[in-house]
Image (spheres, helix red, strand yellow):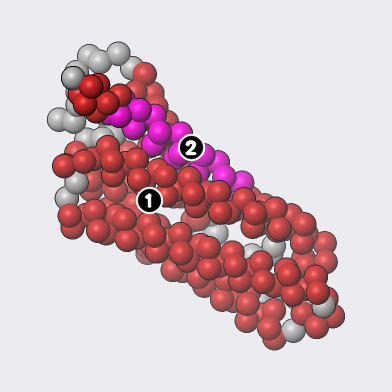
Amino acid sequence: MAEATVVTRSSLRTPKAAAVAGILFSVLLVAVLGLFRLSVPADPLDSGAWLANNAGIVALALNLMPFAGIAFLWFIGVLRDRLGHQEDRFFATVFFGSALLFLAMLFASAAVIGAVVLAFTADPDAIAHSATLHLARALAYILANVYAVKMAGVFMISLSTVILRTRIASRWIAILGFVLALILILGSYYLSWSFLVLPIWVLLISIHILIDNYRPTLGPSLDKPG
């Protein structure tokens, strides 16, 4: 009897945990990207003038990044826990692997920018307008806007497929995920706002889960797939 109670409570809490973690990830990542957009030029081969004026804003964004990553990992964990025995091994591997690669590329890009800021603080004259600055900026740009964005697209495709199979969210969210993922994979290079696609889509999923969790049960719901 006690075991059944624990399982019931877990199944009730998991959707809420996924929703809260997803919302937190979305808000934090949008905030980080917004701070970067306001303080760092989009051109990876800029002169580096932003280091003298906006280093503090960049440092704030870099300090928020790990918390966004933790929230994303939590979101993934509670979703997988929610799926349980419904989880398909193939899509679970792609889903989990693409999420980890996305975070790894994102963190690597942030670490490169952090190293540039730290080196500039130690010796501004040696870093400003140097080849090292251009190399670091180009590396961070490629990691974030090519590799991380592509992994975000793969993550969205795999999660959208899982949603269609298990009905842990509405069908329209999965279809929207497929469309946005294709935009990320095929056209992200031409769209400067493409990095916002994943957090906004995760925010939609999280809000849907949260609303559905508090909605009176009048048919199929998140707690009763199918």
Mark 1: which amino acid? Leu
Q: Is residue 140 visible?
A: yes
Tell me whether circle 2 and circle 1 mark residues in contact (CB < 8 Å): no
Q: At numbered mark 1, what does the secondary structure look like: helix, strand or loop?
A: helix
Range shown magenta: 10-32
Q: Main secondary structure of the magenta part?
A: helix
Q: Is residue 123 above or below residue 158?
A: below
Q: At numbered mark 2, what does the secondary structure look like: helix, strand or loop?
A: helix
Asked if residue 56 lies left or right of residue 148, the reply is: right
In the image, residue 122 lies in the stretch drawn in magenta? no
Mark 2: which amino acid? Ile
Are there few (<14), some (14-19), or many (20+) residues within 10 Å of tag 2?
Answer: many
Residue 206, quarter of picture: top left
In the image, residue 13 lies in the stretch drawn in magenta? yes
User: At 64% from the left edge and 68% from the top edge, which residue is drawn?
Assistant: 113
Q: Is residue 60 above or below residue 16?
A: below
